[in-house]
Amino acid sequence: MQTIDVRSDTTISVTVNGEQQAITVDVRTSLLDLLRERLHLSGTKKGCDHGQCGACTVHVNGRRVTSCLTLAVMHDGAEITTIEGLGSPDNLHPMQAAFVACDGYQCGYCTSGQIMSAVALLKEPCGPDDADVKELMSGNICRCGAYANIVAAIQQVRKST
Amino acid sequence: MHTFEFVRPADSAAAVATAAQAKTAQQGADVRFVAGGTTLLDLMKLNVETPARVIDINRLPLDKIEATPDGGLKIGATVRNSDLAHHPTVQRDYAVLSQAILNGASAQLRNMATTAGNLLQRTRCVYFRDTAMPCNKREPGTGCPAITGANRTLAVLGTSEHCIATNPSDMCVAMATLEATIHVQGSKGARAIPIGDFHLLPGSTPNRETVLEPGDLITYVTLPPPVAGSRQVYLKLRDRASYEFALASAAVVITVGGGKVTRARVALGGVGTKPWRSPEAEAALAGQPINRANFRNAAEAALRDAKPQSENAFKIELAKRCLTHALQMATV
């Protein structure tokens, strides 16, 4: 193996929502900006750009991460899932359906991140109570204050699976 | 963000050799390792850190948790905080570590952050994070505006006239009570650093936060064999219920026999310029009957040298109550 020098503009290969892509990026490009600006997947939102709000939450190799706080070049070869890859209007993911049923949003800006975070939570160790869900969802903030319904949506999915 | 050269070395030796070319491993380093990136990229976006070269260590084989021959635990540098916190051996034998990690950050950040990165976590002081402000840590000699400014979340222990910045890590406070050892691969070979010696007090050089030199790569952390019968608690007090740094926190690892303390390890978070192991509290607890008065006594000893800032005097009493309560929780 050799040291790979990856300079200012580099080409990486990522699989996004099941589709493999080769993209040339400025090395400073965050994963978030790769998804939104280069791949035009604008479902993932930029809220704070510093990993503090969770609006940019996506799955990298199955784990929820804040995509603003990681570089695209660090994820060469990774599998990334965004909200667009979770479900479609005609074929909603159960979590998306639960958010609709429980009215888990107002303006919708945090919602993609909330749903991506919640779907990942289903596969993480989490106690049964609302308090446990709130704790594990604390990285996703909602200025509209839809928290009660967000928690209800998540618990509805947890109880049904 | 300033541009940089992004390098992915084939092995640790190449990583060390590349980083050894840096002028410093401390604040403002020209070469930085990136693992989770949750501190580094945050600071690079603020131009507080402006490395010319970033070395990605995520693909090096440093991501395992294994038993050591002496019955302890070896934790790879790039083990994710969430994996560490949920590891069955950690939950069973080093519960204070699991509790501390799960009390920190958010689930997303815990999935990204690593053991080594958490050891190197930087202060949240607003002046440090703002390049428009003077800051002795970021630019030595420019002054410390926090001393006469917004210092509610800053330190009361280990401060100097040059810097009062708090170390915000929860993991490090727990690791202090577990007497962790940090293993470093450097350009002159490998060495082992007890965690108590790893972080530096600010003194007159707040820009120097650890003993690391250029080229030094943390490769793993070891914990000694678990102490039989120890009760372990991490208690964190803060303005919000979750996803917020400590105003004061306490880690305790305590063994009790015949109603008396037979062994105690105590450390405080949120109040010190480094993770604050308290030999004063430990000495005050040794051999004492377990009761609230003795716990409070130990807490008084721990905070005896605390110096309040203009906005955080409350932390002294808060930390005392935090430690007292943690000891109660551990010995109930």
Image (cartoon, coloured by chain):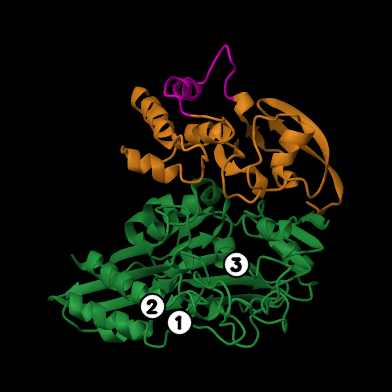
Chain colours: A orange, B green
**Distance in Å between CA atoms under marks 3 and 1:** 21 Å
Which is nearer the N-term, disc 3 or disc 1?
3
Looking at the picture, which amino acid does disc 1 mark?
Pro
Looking at the picture, which amino acid does disc 3 mark?
Arg
Q: Which residue is mark 2?
A: B316
Percent across and percent down for residue A35 are: 72, 35
Secondary structure of the residue carrying tag 3 is loop
Q: Quadrant of residue B9?
A: bottom right
- The lab-note entry on whether marks 2 and 1 share a chain reads yes
Secondary structure of the residue carrying tag 1 is loop
Name the side, left or right, on which B1 lies relative to A90: right
From what the image shows, is residue A83 above or below residue A53?
above
* Nearer mark to the viewer, of 2 and 3: 2
Q: Which residue is mark 1?
A: B308
Looking at the picture, which amino acid does disc 2 mark?
Ile
Q: What residue lies at 79% left-to-right and 56% top-to-bottom?
A: B1
Which is nearer the N-term, disc 2 or disc 3?
3
Q: Specify few, some or many for label 2: CA neighbours under 10 Å numbering under 14, 14-19, or 20 or more.
A: many
- Find the magenta span and give its range: A86-104
Q: Specify few, some or many for label 1: CA neighbours under 10 Å numbering under 14, 14-19, or 20 or more.
A: some
Q: What residue lies at 36% left-to-right and 55% top-to-bottom?
A: B91
Percent across and percent down for residue B71 are: 38, 65
- The lab-note entry on whether marks 3 and 1 share a chain reads yes
The chain that hosts pointer 1 is: B
**Looking at the image, do the residues carrying marks 2 and 1 touch, with CB atoms under 8 Å apart?**
yes
From what the image shows, is residue B199 above or below residue B44?
below
The chain that hosts pointer 3 is: B
Q: Specify few, some or many for label 3: CA neighbours under 10 Å numbering under 14, 14-19, or 20 or more.
A: many
